[in-house]
Image (tube, grey):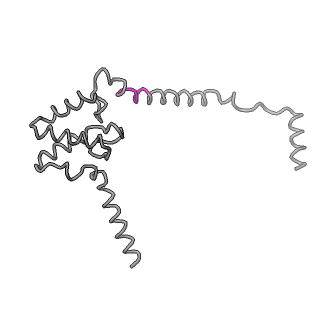
């Protein structure tokens, strides 16, 4: 019986915690038209919370994120297209508000820098492995002289 209760509690916690990000959108913000609400959610998922910076405005509880969610819904109600709403928000807050910045001249470094970092790491690893395999004789110790061998035997016999 105790094990069943634990299993039920675990499932309940899992189910409740899976919906936590969705709780950021408050009931008063929801649009009565399901199609408009779906469009608003799609747009909100692509916009960055300027306070949290690692969450979309759809997932954030920050007051600014709420203001942006309301702004998106107001513009959709006014009849604007999804692209027009996104363009308005980007014009107002800059490209930083986009979770996925566009590929253009200003963001080129942002998009290609991971590849440069990976290439630099691969180059360093290849050089290090070549260096370690290229000179194994230099890393090994020189052979012991007869006097050193005698001294070593004496030390080993003492211990």
Question: In the image, is 42 to the left or to the right of 159?
Answer: left
Q: Residue at horizontal 14%, vertical 37%?
A: 75
Q: Nearer the viewer, residue 38 or 126?
A: 38
Residue 36 position by quadrant: top left
Q: Residue at horizontal 14%, vertical 48%?
A: 31
Q: Locate the N terminus by quadrant.
A: bottom left
Q: Residue at horizontal 24%, vertical 39%?
A: 68
In the rendered image, residue 130, in percent from the top left (x then y), is placed at 56, 28
In the rendered image, residue 111, in percent from the top left (x then y), is placed at 34, 28
- 21 is higher (above) or lower (below) than 11: above
| Magenta segment, prevailing SS (helix, strand or loop) | helix
In the rendered image, residue 66, in percent from the top left (x then y), is placed at 26, 43
Q: Which residues are magenta?
A: 111-116
- 108 is higher (above) or lower (below) than 154: above
Q: Nearer the viewer, residue 31 or 117?
A: 31
Which residue in the rendered view is the most extreme toward the left? 79
Question: In the image, is 155 to the left or to the right of 107?
Answer: right
């Amino acid at each position: 019986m105790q094990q069943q209760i634990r299993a039920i509690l675990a499932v309940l916690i899992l189910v409740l915690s899976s919906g936590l990000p969705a709780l950021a959108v408050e009931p008063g913000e929801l649009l009565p038209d399901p199609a408009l609400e779906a469009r608003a959610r799609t747009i909100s998922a692509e916009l960055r919370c300027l306070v949290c910076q690692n969450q979309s405005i759809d997932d954030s509880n920050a007051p600014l994120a709420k203001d942006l969610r309301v702004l998106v819904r107001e513009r959709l109600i006014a009849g604007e297209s999804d692209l027009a709403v996104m363009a308005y928000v980007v014009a107002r807050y800059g490209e930083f508000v986009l979770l996925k910045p566009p590929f253009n001249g200003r963001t080129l470094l942002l998009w290609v820098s991971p590849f440069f970092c990976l290439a630099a790491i691969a180059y360093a690893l290849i050089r290090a492995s070549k260096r370690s395999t290229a000179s194994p004789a230099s890393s090994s110790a020189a052979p012991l002289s007869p006097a050193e061998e005698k001294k070593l035997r004496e030390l080993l016999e003492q211990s």
